[in-house]
Image: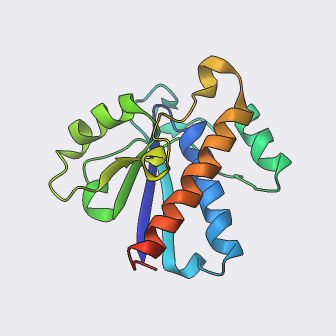
């Protein structure tokens, strides 16, 4: 089983969108049994007294618009123990790339990467928290998830 963890700042927009888009992609290809897919936050901004916020309403609306449910998802904090539990730990932007190794205790096995590094045009996934443009974020995430899935096939992981 391939264990994938998507990571962003608060785990209410980009990383849950990536989690559920990727789950949808592998399900449509009949590969859901090959994967365990989750998402986490690098910061506690959306976690209060141990309870995470649900997926941000505009992110949830965008997923619903394309027929993907994220029901029941609440923000969770990235933990040092996640490093041993996941094969790929995929951040959404450069800020995540700086925080993930600090939280995870380094990256001795080269598990940490950015989603759009798998594409022909590496860049940060657009942050809709600041732009309000969930369409661009969704487009970036689909591009990255498709490229990541292609990478796994090309590498013989699938």
| Relative height, residue 146 to residue 113 (above, below) | below
Q: Quadrant of the N terminus?
A: bottom left
The answer to whether residue 13 of the structure is visible from this angle is yes
Q: Is residue 107 above or below residue 41?
A: below
Residue at image position (41%, 49%) is 90
Where is residue 70 shown, x and y percent of the image? 69, 52
Residue nearest the viewer, comparing 155 with 47: 155
Residue 45, compared with residue 15, is above or below; it is above
What residue appears at the point 82 percent right and 52 percent down from the top-left corner? 66
Q: Is residue 55 visible?
A: no
Residue 69: percent from left, percent from top: 75, 55
In the image: residue 31, left or right of residue 61: left
Residue that extends furthest to the top in the rendered view of this protein:
130
Please name the residue shown 42% across and 47% down the image. Answer: 117
Residue 61: image location, x then y, percent: 80, 40
* Horizontal and vertical percent position of residue 10: 50, 32
Which residue extends farthest front?
Answer: 120
- Which quarter of the figure has residue 53? top right
Coloring basis for residues: rainbow
Location of residue 135 with respect to 133 vertically, above or below: below
């Amino acid at each position: 089983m391939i264990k994938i963890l998507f990571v962003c700042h608060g785990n209410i927009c980009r990383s849950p969108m990536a989690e559920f888009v990727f789950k949808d992609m592998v399900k449509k290809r009949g590969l859901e049994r090959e994967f365990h897919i989750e998402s986490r936050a690098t910061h506690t901004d959306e976690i209060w007294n141990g309870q995470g916020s649900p997926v941000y309403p505009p992110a949830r609306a965008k997923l619903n618009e394309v027929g993907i449910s994220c029901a029941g998802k609440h923000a969770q904090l990235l933990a040092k123990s996640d490093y041993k539990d996941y094969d790929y730990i995929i951040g959404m932007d450069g800020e995540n790339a700086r925080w993930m190794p600090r939280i995870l205790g380094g990256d001795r096995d080269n598990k940490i990467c950015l989603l759009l590094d798998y594409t022909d045009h590496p860049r940060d996934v657009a942050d809709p928290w600041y732009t309000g443009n969930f369409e661009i974020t969704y487009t970036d995430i689909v591009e990255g998830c498709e490229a990541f899935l292609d990478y796994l096939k090309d590498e013989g992981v699938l």
